[in-house]
Image (tube, rainbow, N blue to C red):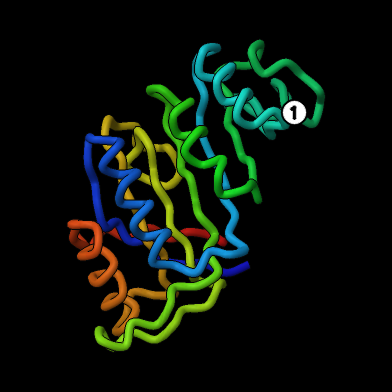
């Protein structure tokens, strides 16, 4: 397992602005084989119903711990709220319906891209799939939903916080009208 540095490039209280930024960044990336991963904390039965409509085979466990309920045990998630959701390797087209289903609950949606392409005019080389990720945190300031908020943050992932890697962060931030504030989180991949 390796890690990446997830750099915050845009934080906004306007979810539609955050989604537009993600669409712009996804359009810049190579994403032919792309997938989406979901992590969330679901607190209400209404949100759960909407999320299960989008992801019917949802993988989850009770926030109090697996012994209090999980998808592996065949428990009813509605009886175990709040629950933590970890659903991986879904088609890219599931991302926006999942985000719309969240309501006030917090989540991180990560796009696993094929690559960040080279940008010769900015002096940037291509970045392989291993470090080509993009995460939108919804109703949370961090990747792990530990800091619930009413903002949404777009993070771009790079191998490390040095040199040309940070140049890419600044360049990507500029493409969406954001700016790199220096806020970086370690993200296990």
Q: In this view, does 187 lie to the left or right of 24?
A: right
- Vertical order, 62 against 91 (above or below): above
Quadrant containing the C terminus in the rendered view: bottom right
The residue lying toward the viewer, choosing from 30 and 148, is: 30
Q: Is residue 4 left or right of residue 130?
A: left
Q: Quadrant of residue 2?
A: bottom right
Mark 1 element type: loop
Report the number of numbered marks. 1
The residue lying toward the viewer, choosing from 38 and 188, is: 38
- Vertical order, 85 against 117 (above or below): above
Residue occupying the far right of the picture: 73
The residue lying toward the viewer, choosing from 23 and 4, is: 23
Quadrant containing the N terminus in the rendered view: bottom right
Q: Mark 1 points at which residue?
A: 71
Where residue 31 appears, x then y in whole percent? 53, 64
Q: Which residue is drawn at 33% across and 74% down?
A: 161
Q: Which residue is drawn at 50% across and 71% down?
A: 131
Where residue 124 appears, x then y in whole percent? 33, 84
Where residue 136 appears, x then y in whole percent? 39, 47
Q: Residue at x 26, y 58 (%)?
A: 9
Q: In this view, does 159 lie to the left or right of 21?
A: right
Q: Which residue is drawn at 55% across and 44% down?
A: 93
- Vertical order, 117 against 95 (above or below): below
Q: Is residue 39 left or right of residue 136?
A: right
The residue lying toward the viewer, choosing from 189 and 30, is: 30
Where residue 56 appears, x then y in whole percent? 69, 28
Local crowd at mark 1 within 10 Å, few (<14), some, or many (≥20)?
some
């Amino acid at each position: 397992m390796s890690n990446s540095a997830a750099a915050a490039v845009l934080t906004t209280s306007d979810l539609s602005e955050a989604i537009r930024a993600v669409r712009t960044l996804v359009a810049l990336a190579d994403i032919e084989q792309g997938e989406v991963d979901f992590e969330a904390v679901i607190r209400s039965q209404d949100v759960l119903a909407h999320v299960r409509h989008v992801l019917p085979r949802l993988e989850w466990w009770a926030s109090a711990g697996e012994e209090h309920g999980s998808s592996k045990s065949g428990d009813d998630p509605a009886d175990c709220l709040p629950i933590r959701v970890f659903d991986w390797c879904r088609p890219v087209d599931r991302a926006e319906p999942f985000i719309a289903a969240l309501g006030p609950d917090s989540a991180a949606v990560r796009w696993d891209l094929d690559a960040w392409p080279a940008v010769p005019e900015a002096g940037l080389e291509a970045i392989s799939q291993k470090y080509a990720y993009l995460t939108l945190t919804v109703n949370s300031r961090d990747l792990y939903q530990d800091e619930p908020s009413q903002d949404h943050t777009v993070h771009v992932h790079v191998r490390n916080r040095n040199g040309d890697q940070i140049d890419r962060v600044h360049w990507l931030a500029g493409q969406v009208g954001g700016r790199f504030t220096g806020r970086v989180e370690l993200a296990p991949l």
